[in-house]
Image (cartoon, rainbow, N blue to C red):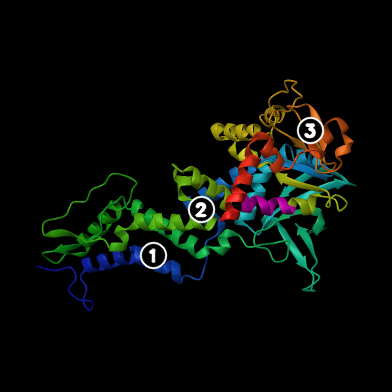
Amino acid sequence: MWPIFRSIAKKTPIEEIKLEERAEEKTLEEVLLQAFMQQGSVSLEEALEVPTFAGCVNKVCDTVSIIPIKLYRRNKEGVEEVKNDDRVKLLNVDTQDTLTGTDFKKAITFDYLTNKGGYAFINKRGNRFMSLNYVEADKVSFLDGIDPIFKDYKIQVDGQEYEGYQFLKVCRRTKNGHSGISMVKENNLLLTVSYTTLKFEGRLVKRGGNKKGFLESERRLDDDSVTALQDGFSNLYTDENEKVIVLNNGVKFHESSNSSVEMQLNENKKANANEICKVFGMPPEILNGGATEEQKQMFIQYCIIPVMKAIIESINRDLLLESEKKNFFFDYDVSELTRADIKTRYEAYAIGYKNRFLQIKEIRAMENLPDIGIPYFMLGMNDVLYDPASGDIFMPNLNQFANVKDPAKYPQTGSQNLSNVPPADETDKKDDPKKEEKDNAKDESNDQG
């Protein structure tokens, strides 16, 4: 009886088959160790093959891209929306290039997360904005100045040189204002391990799920038999067709046990997926489904809003004229985040209407419904309207005005309501005629005591 593995010094042909197969097969521990030890790093294309990473990127891009951007102006009365501005149309509807507003915001957000930044050429004629032309990040390069304090740079696209202010620049973790660090570069080790684990799983599937093992022969095999066995097992460990191998008399197959790490492949994948979600600040349930309201709020607060803040600040820097930056600003209309949840949206409207800081006309406008011609504001009869600037008070239930600063301003109501109001103790006596007698008796009792 010939054992297959007798010694390293003298190997049978079957031993050579096993050693060749063993050299081609790697356990999960070896694959992960190689991921830690290798000097290279995963590319963006390889990182996007990791389902969790691609899912997180797409979820952020899709969410940010559907939120409209509006232009506002500060005035003495507060803040008002500026409509019919060319820049608002370029950002939300049509860039006057090849992309729609949604596609443009999605491309900028994608490059912000996965590359050195998102870039677009600002096509202007004087102070009029003609178009926003998206430029792929890989085609953009920079010529930096030598002064580390008063920094300056030029932008190059295919050899053509531009000034920095001619481009919209949205960068993540930037220190120079024109290029930043992508999530792929920042978390390359995590993505390398996830990608290598995915490749290892692919090799397992490619083998058709057949278990590893070794052969044992009762007698020594000639070269033709060894070659036939080698070809048979090579064909067996492929997923192209359904194949079998016939072992001659005296040849036995012994299964080798899987390593503990290999048996925990799914657990490792889940752990890696959760770590990637942590990098984005995204609860895993957002991707897997079944997210609670609290988890949805966490997704908006910790994942979406930071990205929106970075984009909108870059837009305010690059798309506003210098003369506008004091009183004008762009911002996202975050009410779109609740548009998909009609119950939450209507409950918010009800609260605003009940507390009288939203009116029917404003609510219908937010829902893109036509104005039904109700110009009135809802007020309760128990409300008192106070103007702190003038001191005027209007009491709807009495249909009267008064002034806390100048009671004589409204003589018919001012003297009655403000000047001649009796002290609190006199009012109490009027309400209770015997109160004065009770108080005197109480004082006499105290004196006798």
- Residue 264 screen position, x and y as percent: 32, 58
Q: Residues within 10 Å of mark 1 (few under 14, many from 20)?
A: some
Residue where numbered disc 1 is placed: 31
User: Is 243 positioned to the left or the right of 188 in the image?
Assistant: left
Q: Quadrant of the C terminus?
A: bottom right
Q: Earlier in the sequence, mark 2 or mark 3?
A: 2
In the figure, residue 125 lies in which quadrant? top right
Q: Identify which residue, 352 or 104, lies in the foreground.
A: 352
Residue at the image point whose x is 18% and y is 68% from the top: 4
- Residue 40 screen position, x and y as percent: 52, 68
Query: Which residue is farthest top?
Result: 372
The total number of labels drawn is 3
For the residues labelled 2 and 3, the Cα–Cα distance comes to 60 Å
Determine whether the residue tagged by mark 3 lies in a helix, strand or loop: strand
User: Is 270 positioned to the left or the right of 386 in the image?
Assistant: left
Residue where numbered disc 2 is placed: 53
Is 398 situated above or below 128?
above
| Dominant SS in magenta | helix
Is 142 situated above or below 66?
below
For the residues labelled 1 and 2, the Cα–Cα distance comes to 20 Å
What amino acid does circle 2 point to? Answer: Phe
Residue where numbered disc 3 is placed: 394
Determine whether the residue tagged by mark 2 lies in a helix, strand or loop: helix
Q: Identify which residue, 375 or 388, lies in the foreground.
A: 388
The answer to the question of whether label 3 and label 1 lie on touching residues, with beta carbons closer than 8 A, is: no
What amino acid does circle 1 point to? Answer: Val
Residue at the image point whose x is 11% and y is 65% from the top: 219
Q: Is 305 within the magenta?
A: yes
